[in-house]
Amino acid sequence: MNTTTSGWINGFLGVLIFSGSLPATRIAVAEFDPLFLTVARATIAGLLAVCLLLVFREKRPARSDLLALAVVSMGVVIGFPLLTALALKHITSAHSIVFVGLLPLSTAIFGVLRGGERPQPVFWLFSCLGSLIVAGFALLQEEAASSIGDVLMLGAIIACGLGYAEGARLSRKLGGWQVISWALALSLPVMLVLSAAAMPAALPHLGSTSWLGLAYVSLFSMLIGFIFWYRGLALGGIAGVGQLQLLQPFFGLVLASFLLNEKVSFSMFGATLAVVACVAGAKKFAR
C-alpha cells in the first residue's frame, strides 16, 4: 500500500470517528453538565496522551511551537467540545450536524489566513453562498432551531477550523498523532483543576447511556479520531484528505437517526447537500 492510499484510508477512518461526536455529545449532555463534559473528556484524553508520549519517548516540541499548540488546544480540545455541548442543550444533534458542513470551509479559510495563500474570487463566492444556505436553513427550522444553539454552533465551527488548520500545519513538523497528544498534554493541568471544580454532586448511575457518550467523546472524538485524522493529513496531503470532511454530515445524520431516533427531514438533507457542494467548489478554487 502506497503512502497516499494509506493517508486516504486513515483520513476516512478519522471522519467516521468524528461523525459520532455530536450524537454522542447529545447523549452525554442529557445528564452531564456541558462544562463538566468538556473538561472531563479533555482530562481523560489528556492522561492517555501523556502516557503515549512517555511510552514512545517523544521529543518535546520546540518553544516556537508552543503558541501553535495552544491554538490547537483552544480550538479542538476546549472550544469546539464546549460550544457544541452548550449548543446541544438547545438543538438536536441532527440539526447541529448541518453546521458541520461548514467545517471544511472554515478550515480552508484559516489555512488561507495562516498560509498566506491568495484564493481565486470564485472561492469567496462559494464561501458566502454556503454560509447563506446554512443561515437560511437555521431560520426556517422553527421546531429544531434555536438562535442560541445556532450561534454556539457557528462559534464551534470557527474554533474547530482554526484548530484543524494549526494542527495540519504542525503535523508536517511534529507528526500526526503527536500534535493532538501535545495539545492535550498542554491543557491537562488546567483541565484537571476544572474537572475537580466542575464535578457534579451526584453523578449519573453506572448503567446510564450518558457514560457511554462520555467514553466515546473522550477516547474516540478527543484522541483516537485525531490520530487517524492527522496521520491521514500528513501522509495523503492536507488539501486532498481534508475534503473527506465533506462526508461527515452524511454519516452524522445517519447516526443521529438510528441512535437517537431524531427526525432527519428532506430539507435537512437538501441543505447538507447544498453546503457540501459549496464547500467542494470553494476547495477547488482555494489556490
Image (cartoon, rainbow, N blue to C red):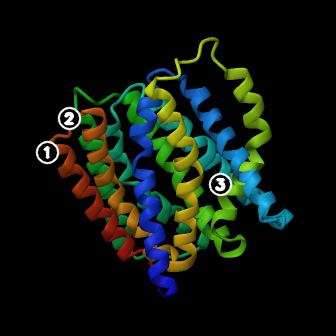
- Answer with left or right where residue 95 lies relative to residue 18: left
Labels 2 and 3 touching (C-beta < 8 A): no
Q: Is residue 70 visible?
A: no
Q: Nearer the viewer, mark 1 or mark 2?
A: 2
Compare marks 3 and 1 and give the one earlier in the sequence.
3
Name which quarter of the figure residue 113 lies in: bottom right
Of the residues shown, which amino acid type is indicated by label 1? Phe
Write the residue at 60% across / 72% down: 115
Write the residue at 60% across / 12% down: 202
Of the residues shown, which amino acid type is indicated by label 3? Val
Distance between mark 2 and mark 3 Cα atoms = 34 Å
Q: Nearer the viewer, mark 2 or mark 3?
A: 2
Q: Is residue 9 visible?
A: yes
- Answer with left or right where residue 209 lies relative to residue 171: left
Disc 1 target residue: 266
The image's mark for residue 263 is: 2
Disc 3 target residue: 72
- Answer with left or right where residue 248 lies relative to residue 136: right
Quick one: which residue is furthest to the bottom in this view? 2
Name which quarter of the figure residue 123 lies in: bottom left
The image's mark for residue 213 is: none
Q: Secondary structure at mark 1?
A: helix
Q: Secondary structure at mark 2?
A: loop
Labels 1 and 2 touching (C-beta < 8 A): no
Q: Secondary structure at mark 3?
A: helix
| Quadrant of the snapshot with the C terminus | bottom left
* Image vertical order of residue 277 relative to residue 19, above or below: below
Distance between mark 3 and mark 1 Cα atoms = 35 Å
Residue 186 is situated, as x and y percent measured from the top left of the image, at 77, 49
* Image vertical order of residue 136 relative to residue 16, above or below: above
Residue sitting nearer the eye, 90 or 11? 11
Compare marks 2 and 3 and give the one earlier in the sequence.
3
